């Protein structure tokens, strides 16, 4: 979403290098050096409105000082005030005293301003996507590895077919997302915050070749506001509804509130997030009503980006409580993960993720007594977004995932 809103931020390194080489555009800046340096420092440290005030003061005292006028244009650009950025940069461009090499850089800057302004002015952005794939699952029914389970001095014989069953499936995913950019900017301290509204509808269907009782369909509908302070933080408060089917039967309706806040520190390549979830889980079949619950969770995430190495590392932990109508299904626990993504070539990436989840159930499991589970999951994969003009809409992806569940109730160990 952030890329859709802001496009690619133009780098001002070349612009500043040219300006430094020319010592001044129009009039020598020495007389206002202290105020100019303070404005540059304010901007570098994110005090954009303070920088604006200082640059305006310089220009009001010395209108011919084009160096300050151009830095004012860059400051407006960083506030996403595109009309003002364009106006002040154009004034410098139209000045016959502006050196030709500086004019070339200003033209590139104005082109970027125009491009980003068009993206900001696009009130409604619709993004459809779809994927079709094949998968093989060695444990479709999440059954135990053995059909004979020892319980103390006794032995439990499961019914035939209750153990793990393998099958292949066709997987379809279709999504339509909508981004509304209100165009409203709210002054927040020294920066501007944008008000957006994002909605999406997603359908996921997994159709097994033989084990149709485990076919799964998930229809998700979500919508909610987002407040985006580009390069600093974002806050989202969406509502979401999920309809889930299993086999040919209705399984459940999940209704969720999913607030989140993320803080970015671009100079260190960091994104620190905190999110919450409150979900009402309403199962359809009368036999499953004991599983109706209110699920609550809090999650903390940390991401670090190494741009030169094209490498991203993410880690996080969530704590949850699932308060069901039956104590047998009521549980709480934690889920920690660590992952990494590396993009060695344009359009291509390799990724991996490891999860460890601990779940403690309140009520006893019949026959087995107290139940405590520990799940380990590892996912490895690669993806490639085709670069050829005719193939750009397409992405190829391969994933491998393995899950091991260790449980004090042996029937749930797989």
Image (cartoon, helix red, strand yellow):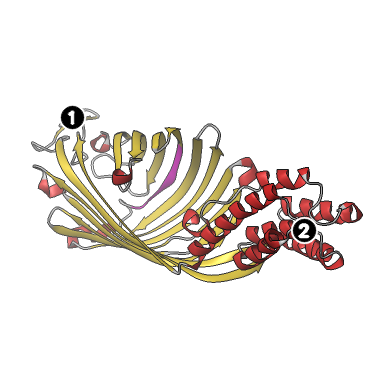
- Give coordinates of residue 41: x percent, y percent: 78, 51
Q: Which mark, residue 146? A: 1
Q: Circle 2: is it few (<14), some (14-19), or many (20+) Cα within 10 Å?
A: many
Q: Is residue 101 left or right of residue 210?
A: right
Cα separation between marks 2 and 1: 79 Å
306 lies left or right of 408: right
Specify whether residue 240 is in view: no
Residue at 82 percent across and 65 percent down: it is 63
Secondary-structure class at tag 1: loop
Q: Disc 2 designates what residue?
A: 66
Q: Is residue 245 above or below residue 163?
A: below
Number of the label disc, if any, that sits on residue 136? none
Image quarter where the C terminus lies is top left
Instruction: Point out the frontmost of discs 2 and 1.
Output: 2
Q: Quadrant of residue 54?
A: bottom right
First of labels 2, 1 by sequence position:
2
Q: Nearer the viewer, residue 5 or 378?
A: 5
Q: Is residue 269 above or below residue 278?
A: above
Q: Is residue 274 left or right of residue 350?
A: right
Range of the magenta residues?
330-338
Q: Secondary structure at mark 2?
A: helix
Q: Residues within 10 Å of mark 1 (few under 14, many from 20)?
A: some
Q: Do we see residue 22 in this rendering?
A: yes
Q: Is residue 196 above or below residue 413?
A: below
Magenta segment's dominant SS is strand
When the figure is inspected, residue 34 is found, relative to residue 181, above or below; the finding is: above
Q: Is 336 within the magenta?
A: yes
Q: Look at 76% across and 56% down and name the residue there.
A: 97
Residue 369 lies in what quarter of the image?
top left
Instruction: Point out residue 294 in the picture as x, y percentages from the top left corner.
Output: 37, 61
């Amino acid at each position: 979403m952030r890329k859709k809103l802001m496009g690619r931020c133009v780098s001002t390194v070349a612009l500043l290098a040219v300006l430094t080489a020319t010592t001044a555009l129009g009039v020598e800046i020495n007389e206002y050096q202290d105020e100019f340096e303070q404005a540059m420092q304010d901007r570098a440290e994110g005090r954009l409105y303070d920088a604006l005030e200082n640059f305006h003061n310089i220009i009001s005292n010395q209108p011919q000082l084009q160096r300050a006028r151009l830095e004012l244009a860059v400051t407006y650009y960083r506030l996403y005030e595109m009309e003002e950025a364009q106006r002040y940069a154009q004034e410098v461009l139209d000045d016959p005293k502006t050196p030709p090499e500086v004019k070339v850089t200003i033209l590139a800057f104005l082109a970027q301003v125009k491009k980003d302004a068009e993206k900001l002015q696009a009130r409604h952005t619709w993004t459809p996507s779809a994927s079709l794939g094949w998968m093989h699952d060695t444990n479709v029914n999440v059954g135990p590895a053995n059909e004979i389970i020892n319980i103390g001095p006794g032995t439990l014989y499961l019914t035939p077919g209750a153990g793990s069953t393998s099958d292949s499936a066709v997987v379809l995913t279709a999504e339509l997302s909508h981004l509304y950019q209100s165009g409203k900017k709210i002054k927040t301290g020294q920066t501007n915050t944008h008000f957006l509204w994002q909605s999406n509808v997603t359908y996921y269907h997994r159709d097994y070749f033989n084990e149709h009782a485990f076919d799964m369909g998930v229809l998700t509908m979500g919508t909610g506001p987002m407040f985006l302070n580009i390069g600093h933080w974002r806050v989202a408060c969406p509502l979401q509804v999920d309809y889930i089917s299993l086999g040919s039967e209705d399984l459940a309706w999940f209704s969720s509130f999913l607030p989140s806040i993320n803080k970015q520190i671009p100079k260190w390549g960091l994104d620190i997030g905190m999110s919450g979830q409150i979900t009402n889980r309403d199962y359809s079949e009368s036999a499953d009503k004991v599983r109706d619950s209110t699920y609550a969770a809090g999650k903390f995430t940390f991401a670090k980006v190494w741009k030169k190495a094209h490498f991203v590392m993410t880690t996080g932990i969530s704590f949850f409580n699932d308060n069901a109508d039956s104590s047998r299904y009521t549980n709480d626990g934690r889920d920690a993960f660590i992952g990494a993504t590396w993009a060695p070539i344009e359009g291509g990436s390799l990724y991996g993720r490891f999860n460890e989840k601990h779940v403690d159930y309140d009520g006893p499991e019949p026959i087995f007594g107290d139940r405590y589970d520990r799940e380990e999951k590892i996912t490895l994969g690669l993806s490639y977004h085709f670069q050829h003009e005719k193939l750009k809409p397409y992405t190829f992806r391969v994933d491998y995932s393995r899950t091991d569940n260790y449980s004090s109730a042996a029937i749930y160990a797989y």
